[in-house]
Amino acid sequence: MVQRAISHHDLEQLSAFMDDQLRPAERRRIEIRLQAEPGLQKELDSLRYTRAMLRSLPPRRAPRNFTLSTAMVGTSRPLSWQPVFGMASALAVVLLVFVLLGDFLVIPGYVGMFPVSQAPAAEESQSLAQSAGEQTKEEALIFPTEAPVSTAAAEAIPQQPSAKAVVPGAVTPTPQATPATGMMADSLPESTSEERMMLEAAPMISEGTPPAAEDLAQTPSISNTLSLTETQVLSGTLQVQEQPGDALAESKESGPAPSERTQDSEPTGLINQNAADSQVPRLWAQVIFWMAELLLACLAVAAGLMSFYLWYAGRH
Amino acid sequence: MDETFLIQSAQAGDLDAFNRLVLAYQDLVYNQALRVLGEEAAAADATQEAFISAYRNIKSFRGGIFRAWLLRIVTNACYDDLRRRQRRPTTPLEPVDDSGEEVESPYWMIDDGDRPEESIERKQLEQAIVGCLERLPVEFKSVVVLVDVQGLDYAEAAITMGKPVGTVKSRLARARLRLRQCLQSYWELLPQEFRLKLEADGQS
């Protein structure tokens, strides 16, 4: 029987053999050697005793429960997504506010909530009123006996009944002034139109009570005619100022426009054309702003809800 | 207890689910810490730190043996405590005898009311084993506690220590050889049931 020296490697092999951790080939070699070498067997026995003593150590129960509380793990918890979502929600709200401000202030042509397209109509009414006022001034120059338009316009209303009284039988100026108004608005720039009005007024006077021919030639009838003209002018002016739309409609409805009427309508047409052209990019900008607002609002709500959910889940 | 479900719940942030895992494994974890550190107070601190660390890093557990993963965390906690002790040696609280050596740790002397049936021999054996373990280097002590005290196999021990199986095998053998020399004089204290088992293993 050959007693081989037991190396450290042999002892490691015995330790693994004891735990059944050797490969089959290594296990067979050790088994053969254990049968042939009593010293190796003795070493194995001592290792088994040692392992048995270690295994005899009684397991100790934990002295207390080591369960965790939220206070233990809450303060230094690893980075969670809750603050990230909270910041994202806050940022989305801030951006939404900026976009809303831009919606009101930045888009060109915006005046509060109303697009610029309505402005030309107001400008046109103002220009018409101004031209009507200018024409009445010309009237005042032609007929110096007449009072200035500004004051006459203010006085015309209560004076109308007297004018009517002066011209009995005459058709009330207001209804008649309506068709005449359009004509007046169109023809005011022309001095010859005054003469036409005078000629038209003469038959009107005659419709009520047949005046005598000498009466027509008399100055009072002429003055009455003038006052009627004045009344018509003033009433037409007033109507132009108060109903610009009607004036525009009248100007459009009455036949072929004279040169002045064409000139007057040309600026209106250009304004409408420009307004239409400028509204297309404004509409696109408006759509883009609305989409941005909607997107930011949804993002803010979603991020805020997610942040709240993560916070609630973390606390409970 | 469905361990997989509890682990998944804990990974989702359910602290109650993790605490159920704590209750299931706290004895195992505490024993590992106690046998490595040799002190009850230090073992309790290391156990608590290990479970806190485990909860914070629960998402890093990608499956496998949860017991081995927990024991790795507590073993590392024990290493950290031993390194702190080496950097800052503390004054022992245990009294010293006339020769200047520390009296055995008090917890060996505690009359544990939960173990009335245990004999004096058992307590003496435990004291001897613990004393011999204390003389081992920490890396040897960890592996022998894992395999021979806690009952892990070589693969689990390798996972716990983060070392190859070959390293576990080598360190375990060297730890057993050293303990064999220290415990030889106490073999007679080995309880009867363990002697019979030894004889049965020898005959197989």
Image (tube, rainbow, N blue to C red):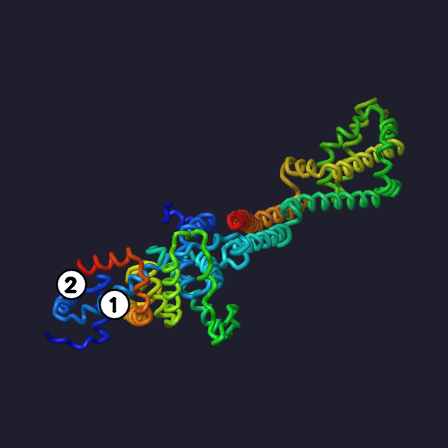
Please, what is the three-letter code of the amino acid marked with disc 1?
Answer: Ser
A113 left or right of B84? right
Q: Nearer the viewer, residue A191 or B14?
A: B14
User: Is A105 placed above or below B39 here?
Assistant: above
The outermost residue toward the left is A1
Residue at 51% x, 50% y: name it: A314
Q: Is residue A262 visible?
A: no
Please, what is the three-letter code of the amino acid marked with disc 2?
Answer: Pro
Residue B174 horizontal/vertical position (percent) = 29, 72
Residue A211 horizontal/vertical position (percent) = 85, 24
Q: Nearer the viewer, mark 1 or mark 2?
A: 1
Residue at 50% x, 72% y: name it: B96
Secondary element under disc 2, as helix, strand or loop, is: helix
> Do the residues indicated by labels 1 and 2 lie within the same chain of the protein?
yes
Q: Nearer the viewer, residue A122 or B197?
A: B197
Q: Residues within 10 Å of mark 1 (few under 14, many from 20)?
A: some
Residue identified by numbered label 1: A46
First in sequence, mark 1 or 2: give its number.
2
Residue identified by numbered label 2: A24
Q: Is residue A168 visible?
A: yes
> In which image quadrant can residue A205 be found?
top right
Number of numbered discs visible in the structure rendering: 2
Residue at 86% x, 28% y: name it: A161
User: Is A218 placed above or below B111 here?
Assistant: above
Residue A129 horizontal/vertical position (percent) = 75, 43
Q: Could you tell me how far apart the alpha carbons at marks 1 and 2 are, in whole angstroms?
A: 23 Å
Chain of the residue displaying label 1: A
